[in-house]
Amino acid sequence: MKFSLVGPVYPYRGGIAHYNTQLALTLASRGHTVQVVSFKRQYPAWLYPGESDKDPSQHPLLTPAEYLLDPLYPWTWLKTLGVIRQSLPDRVVFNWWTTFWAPAYAFLTWRLRRSGIQVLFLVHNVQPHESRFFDRFLARLALGQAGGFITQTGREAERLKELFVGQGQIQRTRVQICPHPEYKMFSSQRIPQVEARRKLQLPGEGPVLLFFGIVRPYKGLEYLLEAIRRSALQGVNPYLIVAGEFWEQKQHYLEIIERLELKDRVRLDNRYIPDEEVADYFSAADLFVAPYVQGTQSGSAHLALGFGLPVVASLSIVDETLMEREGSQTWLAQPGDADSLAIAIRTALQAVQAGNIPKPQVATVGGWERLAQVIEEWE
């Protein structure tokens, strides 16, 4: 079969670029012809909240791609349409995560479907985590053109249905849930914990917690800091490393750290972590923590599972894969509740220290092969 995937890949950075690349590689490994259509420009520089949307990795995850789309230049939409049509794909899969791309995606989807080409949307987030008043309209504009949807949680499937309540579109299309696959693309680079802590200049003794990824308000870092303080008061003294670029005021967190007297227990690495350094952080940690206040799912949590690292996650982002591991590799906490988070952290660390964490197993739910199969078998 022939597939066209539309979405970011290297040199763009981040979890969705890794996701789209791994999906392309999986489909190709299954004998399919895969065309990846990516962006000439992902966002104008003045709109991007981070330092750069380019990946600084020296050894990035790669797949062949055509860089055609620009969100602000409609003539690039026309060129993209022609290139996709010329390849005669059996279906086109759009990665959807932000309404910024709604006009371009709506145009492409409408024209492709008029050409008789099947279009699916692989929905990471129905609407942005920090949504604005116009996001609902823009999401409807683009997603309303789709022939089908793949979501990664039942909760997000419900949000998709709610978006179209009373409009009828969703009843004419299929929504299939396929859990977020584990990210195992870096796990072969894992090194001994002692070596990783030495490389990162972390404490050699005691438990280390990892918060990994862009720091944004909805990810709940302030509740994690409160939880560490409350754990310390009860005799548990983990060290926290926050590895990721701040998309909000770092000073806000420095003030929290000062107030909670955690200056010796927390390190902030305010930068995008390149691919070749990812394994160092996950190898050094005893526990990964995703204290999200809201959200859909966490690619970083699935990266932790790929390394066999136990996870504490808030219920706001729990999907089928995390639920399957509950009590063995995953512990759950209430979102926005530092006490609940502290209890989950202490329970998880007790299991780690007692050696009660099972060796990583191949997940019985999810996986890249399953996602590829869903796309292959779509009718």
Image (cartoon, rainbow, N blue to C red):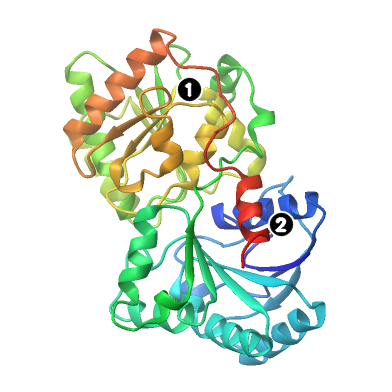
The kind of residue tagged 2 is Ala
Quarter of the picture containing the C terminus is bottom right
Residue located at (30% from left, 40% from top): 314
Figure check: 99 above or below 256: below
- Residue 161 is situated, as x and y percent measured from the top left of the image, at 35, 69
Mark pair 2, 1: CA separation: 36 Å
Crowdedness near tag 2: few (<14), some (14–19) or many (≥20) residues, C-alpha within 10 Å: many
Q: Amino acid at mark 1?
A: Leu
| Disc 2 element | helix
Question: Would you name the residue on which mark 2 appears?
Answer: 24
Task: Where is residue 193? Give x, y as percent.
Answer: 56, 18
Residue in the foreground of this view, choosing between 89 and 250: 89
Residue 197 visible in rendering: yes
Q: Nearer the viewer, residue 265 or 299?
A: 299
Residue 345 at x, y percent in the picture? 30, 25
Residue at the image position 80 percent from the left and 59 percent from the top = 32
Q: Is residue 206 visible?
A: no
Sequence order check, earlier mark of 2 and 1: 2
Q: Which residue is mark 1?
A: 202
- Tell me the tag on residue 339: none
Whether residue 19 sits left or right of residue 333 in the image: it is right
Q: Position of residue 20 (x, y in %)?
A: 63, 58
Front residue (pair 174, 159): 174
